[in-house]
Image (cartoon, rainbow, N blue to C red):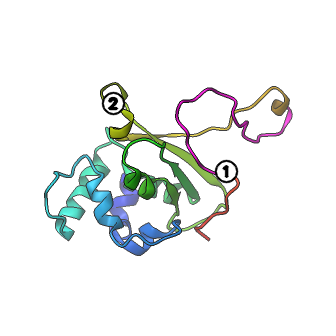
């Protein structure tokens, strides 16, 4: 992912590219990604130089897998990713990060699902929840499905968090 971002750094700072896969255009998506970074110091003025510095810090800090790395992973896999943001924390942040992410070049119509999560859950209440990495979302199988049907089993586990996404939705990356 580091090589992908370093090689195509200007793409990962481009508003048009970062808005692909969304239904609306976020005029400040680059600034939002900067503010969601653990490398950003609240109150700092977001200039192009600050933005580039934070992208580079996030790229080389694998302790925190941030939004830019999801964009890079999508390009490496050459397919769309859907980043699921749980219904926790700030709803504005969720509106920016619960979305499809498009690769630079597509070779597959598959969509890979990831979920934002956090290792800091003990010290955070739901309304102040902040993710610090993402994990793959894998389909669950019942005994009947082991014979060849790989569709997702809905409501097959107990969860206190609604993830609110549609696995059958169409891709916005085309």
Decide whether residue 140 is among the magenta residues.
Answer: no
Instruction: Check if mark 2's residue and mark 1's residue have beta carbons within 8 Å.
Output: no
Quadrant of res 32: bottom left
**Residue 146 placement, left or right of 136:** right
Residue 8 coordinates in the image, percent (x, y): 37, 66
Along the horizontal axis of the image, is 173 left or right of 150? left
Which residue: 53% across, 66% down?
A: 21
Seen in the picture, residue 94 relative to 170 is either above or below; the reply is above
Q: CA distance from mark 2 to mark 1?
A: 28 Å
- Whichever of callouts 2 and 1 sits on the residue coming sooner in the sequence is 2
Q: Write down the residue under mark 1.
A: 167
Picture quarter containing residue 146? top right
Do we see residue 1 in this rendering? Answer: no
Q: Is residue 154 among what the camera can see?
A: yes
Residue under circle 2? 120
Q: Position of residue 151 (x, y in %)?
A: 76, 42
Helix or strand or loop: what does disc 2 sit on? loop
166 is within the stretch colored magenta: yes
Question: Magenta stretch: dominant SS?
Answer: loop
Relative horizontal placement of residue 143, taking residue 166 as reference (left or right): right
Does 22 appear above or below 86?
A: below
* Mark 2 crowd level (few <14, some 14–19, many ≥20, 10 Å Cα): few
- The spot of residue 134 in percent (x, y) is 45, 41
Which residues lie in the magenta part? 147-167
């Amino acid at each position: 992912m580091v090589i992908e971002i370093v090689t195509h750094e200007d793409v990962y700072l481009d508003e048009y590219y970062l808005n692909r896969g969304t239904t609306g255009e976020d005029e400040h998506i680059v600034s939002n990604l900067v503010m969601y970074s653990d490398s950003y110091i609240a109150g700092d003025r977001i200039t192009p130089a600050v933005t580039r510095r934070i992208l580079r810090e996030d790229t080389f800090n694998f302790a925190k897998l941030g939004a830019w790395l999801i964009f890079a992973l999508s390009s490496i896999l050459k397919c769309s990713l859907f980043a699921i943001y749980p219904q926790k924390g700030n709803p504005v942040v969720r509106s920016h990060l619960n979305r499809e992410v498009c690769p630079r070049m597509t070779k597959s119509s598959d969509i890979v699902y990831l979920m934002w999560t956090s290792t800091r859950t003990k010290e955070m209440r739901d309304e102040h929840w902040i993710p610090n990495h993402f994990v793959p979302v894998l389909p669950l199988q019942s005994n009947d499905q082991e014979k060849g049907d790989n569709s997702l089993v809905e409501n097959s586990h107990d969860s206190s968090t609604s993830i609110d996404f549609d696995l059958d939705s169409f891709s916005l990356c085309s």
